[in-house]
């Protein structure tokens, strides 16, 4: 996998200008897991082939997902069912997805999920889900604490360093 770089205002990949035609593909890591863990690699490969034929070269993925798996509004099974505890089978799905993208010369951008869950884990407070329109501001205020709670940010950054697929310093490795 080749990482995209920036020079002045231009993206580059393989020392050539890189123009993005992207799509959201949040379900990728779970589809890429083995079947017995909820995956469907045939569907994943078929959809990636279709996207490639349409000229899509960049996918916005969820490179992580947070539990608890018995809570609403989340992907299941999650990559991190509990703070600091990872589901290796979903990590393998992430590895498979990134490898499948690389074979198609596609890139991925991670959409950082789980902000509210990280705050709930750190503060031990319940997430105020916006089940009605009047709750949206409360949920947004709760979730944006992710950006101002240094202990949470440092914890997540430290955990990401353990993922062999996402360590840009070392490139894509398995």
Image (spheres, rainbow, N blue to C red):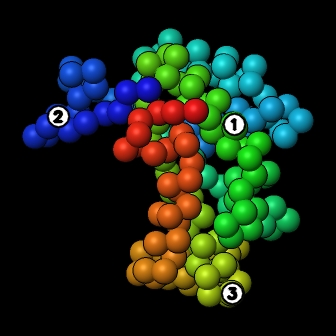
Q: Measured along the vertical axis of the image, is residue 66 above or below residue 83?
A: above
Compared across the picture, whether 31 is left or right of 119 comes to: right
The residue drawn where x is 83% and y is 39% is: 38
How far apart marks 2 and 1 lie (CA) works out to 31 Å
Q: How many C-alpha atoms fall within 10 Å of the one at disc 3: few (<14), some, or many (≥20)?
A: few
Which of pointers 3 and 2 lies earlier in the amino acid sequence?
2
How far apart marks 3 and 2 lie (CA) works out to 43 Å
Residue 93 badge = 1
Q: Measured along the vertical axis of the image, is residue 144 above or below residue 59?
A: below
Residue 113: x %, y % from top left: 56, 59
Compared across the picture, whether 58 is left or right of 97 comes to: left
Secondary structure found at label 1: helix
The residue drawn where x is 67% and y is 66% is: 84
Residue 9 badge = none
Q: How many C-alpha atoms fall within 10 Å of the one at disc 2: few (<14), some, or many (≥20)?
A: few
Residue 124 badge = 3
Query: Which quadrant: the N terminus?
Result: top left
The image quadrant of residue 71 is: bottom right
The residue drawn where x is 58% and y is 33% is: 174
Q: Measured along the vertical axis of the image, is residue 23 above or below residue 152?
A: above
Secondary structure found at label 3: loop
Residue to which mark 2 is pinned = 10
Compared across the picture, whether 37 is left or right of 31 comes to: right
Which of pointers 1 and 3 lies earlier in the amino acid sequence?
1
Secondary structure found at label 2: strand
Q: Is residue 73 visible in this depiction of the protein?
A: no
């Amino acid at each position: 996998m080749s990482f995209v770089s920036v020079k002045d205002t231009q993206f580059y990949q393989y020392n050539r200008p890189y123009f993005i035609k992207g799509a959201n593909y949040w379900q990728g890591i779970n589809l890429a897991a083995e079947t017995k863990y909820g995956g469907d690699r045939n569907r994943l490969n078929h959809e990636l082939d279709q996207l490639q034929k349409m000229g899509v070269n960049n996918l916005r993925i969820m490179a992580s997902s947070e539990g608890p798996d018995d809570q609403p509004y989340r992907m299941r099974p999650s990559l991190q069912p509990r703070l600091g505890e990872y589901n290796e089978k979903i990590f393998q799905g992430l590895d498979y997805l990134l490898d499948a993208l690389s074979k198609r010369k596609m890139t991925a951008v991670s959409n950082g999920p789980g902000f509210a869950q990280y705050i709930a884990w750190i503060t031990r407070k319940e997430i105020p889900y916006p089940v009605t329109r009047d709750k949206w501001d409360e949920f947004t205020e709760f979730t944006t604490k992710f950006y101002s709670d240094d202990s949470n940010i440092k914890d997540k950054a430290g955990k990401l360093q353990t993922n062999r697929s996402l360590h840009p310093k070392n490139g894509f490795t398995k």
